[in-house]
Amino acid sequence: MQGATQTPTNTPPSLQQHCRRNGMVEESWFHLSSPGIDSPDFTMKLGFQQKGLDSSSGQSLDGSFRRSSKSGVSPDRRSEFSTSSRYIPNSRRLFKGLKDYAKKLVDIESFSHYLEDWILEKTCANNSTDRKQLFKSPFPTDELRKLDYALEGILFQQLFRMPYSVYASDDLKEDEYLALEDFLHAIIDGLWRTFWHKNGPLPFFVSCPRYPGSKFYTVENAISKGRLGTLCGAALVAKNGTDDHVKWDQVLELALFKSDIAEGNELGFSSTSICEALFYGFHILLSRSLSKSNTFSSDAVFLLVLDSKFGGVVKFGGDLTKLEVNSSNPYQSVAEWIKLHAEVNVSPVDRIWNKLGNPNWGDLGTLQLLLATFYSIIQWKGPPRKSIASLAADHSLRLQKRWIECRLIGNGNGSVHTRQGSYKQGEIVELDCDEDQRSFRKQPTGLKLKRGEVMLLEDSQGQRGFRIQDTLVDGSCLSYGAISLENPGEVLTVYVGAHPSRLEPSWEDMSLWYQVQRQTKVLNIMKQQGISSKYLPEMVASGRILHSGPCMKQSPAGRCDHPWCGTPILVTYPVGEPLSSIVARSGPFSSEEALRCCRDCLSALRSAVLANIQHGDICPENIVRVDTNSSGSRFLYMPVSWGRAVLEDRDSPAMNLQFSSTHALQQGKLCPASDAESLIYLLYFVCGGTMQQQDSIESALQWRERCWAGRSIQQQLGEVSALLKAFADYVDSLCGTPYPVDYDIWLKRLNRVVDGSDRGKLIQEVAVTLKLEDGAETSGTSGGCTSLSC
């Protein structure tokens, strides 16, 4: 090369200094590019981080470890790599030195000789009084728990069982390696199909080496050639086009397989097992750094260390520019580099296979192996299309679905209580207390208040007193009718939440959380945005209950040991009777009441939409009839229980097999017309429609498909009112689409019929902003019943 003695302008300063210190003749700096990137001047970035996925520690050119900065990496791209990890020797002497080390470092016993004492000190295996492991684990427990949530319902299946024996035996080695090969294939296939590509060929395979630099064999080939006993383990290897020859720089991850990884060490890995993992890990790092085609995005390698029962992970990486390659003793030189400059993480040892030879897929030991393999795939293929965090976020939805299934087993119904006997099929009846107590969903076991008791509430404005008048049943949760001691003229609804320490143990306490804390948040948002309507509940007070006797809490926000201390309270106005109770007592609604119910609920939903809020749980228990005692209409209808309201995309609505929208059951999310669709099912129910019992989401979806296809809902509503039938047709045209409901035009039509007024009464806001009025002029009928002029 001409002018080789001059430092190229594009050589990083840290490497220029490194070359000068070592008296090296510098060559031009290598530029890396991944497939699909044509520019030779493509700038390499240090690591990556995807939303919901923590990247492994990147390494700077000066050798310091630090967390990589965020970058907008699109799925399945390999265009951003860590420059330090893809270390390219920038001098012939350095390149030759590393290549020479790769050839000389072949004796694992000599390698272990220089590291064993250091490893014993780091693991404290020689100190029986200190059982603390000084090597940090590569994965925090929270990260493993998140992966566990993400993999719920994902099938990992090892078909070839790991043989079980109390003592290690060479007679079982053939079966052990076949099981190991199948185990690794199940891991790589399951992770790739779950996070990257569900279909298509798998870009990895399993192959077995004998020693560093050796050829790779399938288990069958090793058995046929009599080399099974010399195998060191099995490697996950990336496919390289049509080339069947496996090179060490294609190794994603190496699983060392030993007869006993602990060798009597009760604390974890034996020092010999860790030394062997570092020995092979260093050779893999060397192979990657000397490779011309390598595109790994991290300077670390994950090594699985296994025997036929237990296993764990060793993560190993470091800056090879700090390795002294001029030493006459390469073993000592590498050992010093590992002690001073490398990063070594060692996981605890846990059970992998049970006595039947099946992996414990959901246990910590196997989750560690899965997470190590997950990051190894990222090093080769880049970030996944689906992150761990995004799949783990669906855990709450799966939990909700399981809750519904269990509730159906207990009650035989999703939402509206029914029972067989002398009653007609589908007839709604009130359940007595004994029957309620035998059902799966028992009443909450939290704080119980009695008639006549005075409850003191503490909020930011001080203390307020309320006298309990009656016990209400609002949906699945208890609430109370109460009067304020300051203003005893109005009856209020009091929701008593679960004690903060009880939010985990039971389903009922979680329901109380939605009913109190979450509903408080939603009503506060409405209040802050100036949304106020007589068809929406009004928040009177929210705070925490004050108990009798001394309170030992250390701060205003703290709580003491008293079982009532810190219990959240929500007080709303007014009090109403759920539609489920009204229908059970009085039967189907008249045409006038059905139209009024539709109008009032639409008015409430329209007001909420102005604040970008959807109710998400429209059902007979969550719509109450309020006695207004006015000279005009005596009753109005009001949606309550706003705790399951959807405020943003990540919120999940309630899952109700009878009244949830089709989109909610299919996707776990709401579309703009979901609340209106649930309102149609509600009207169908109060107008005498038969609500069949559903035992699964599939059967609930089939019922909806039959009803809409056969127009049975429209026919039932048409017998009550032609306007309700037209509204059902309109909602049917919007179901599952991104188009919003035109509340204004339907409220105008409903007002004409209900109030007999041409000018109508759209919402009767207490405080109507200019923005709210502008919103009332937008949106069209978009798809249904535009010709109706009621």
Image: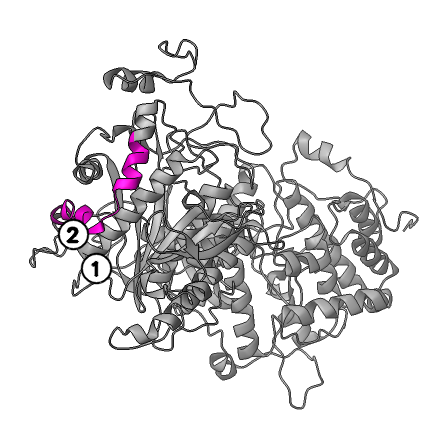
What residue did someone put label 2 on?
123
Could you say which quadrant of the image residue 65 lies in? top left
Q: Which residues are magenta?
A: 97-119
Name the quadrant of the N terminus.
top left
User: In the image, 226: left or right of 670?
Assistant: left
- Between residues 236 and 509, which one lies in front from this camera angle? 236
Marks 2/1: CA distance?
8 Å
CB-based contact (under 8 Å), mark 2 and mark 1? yes
Q: Is residue 173 left or right of residue 495?
A: left
Type of amino acid under label 2: Thr
Q: Which mark is residue 268?
A: 1
| First-in-chain label (2 vs 1) | 2
> Would you say residue 513 is visible in this rendering?
no
Q: Residue at x 74, y 37 (%)?
A: 776
Q: Is residue 513 left or right of residue 271?
A: right
Residue 752 painted magenta: no
Three-letter code, disc 1: Gly
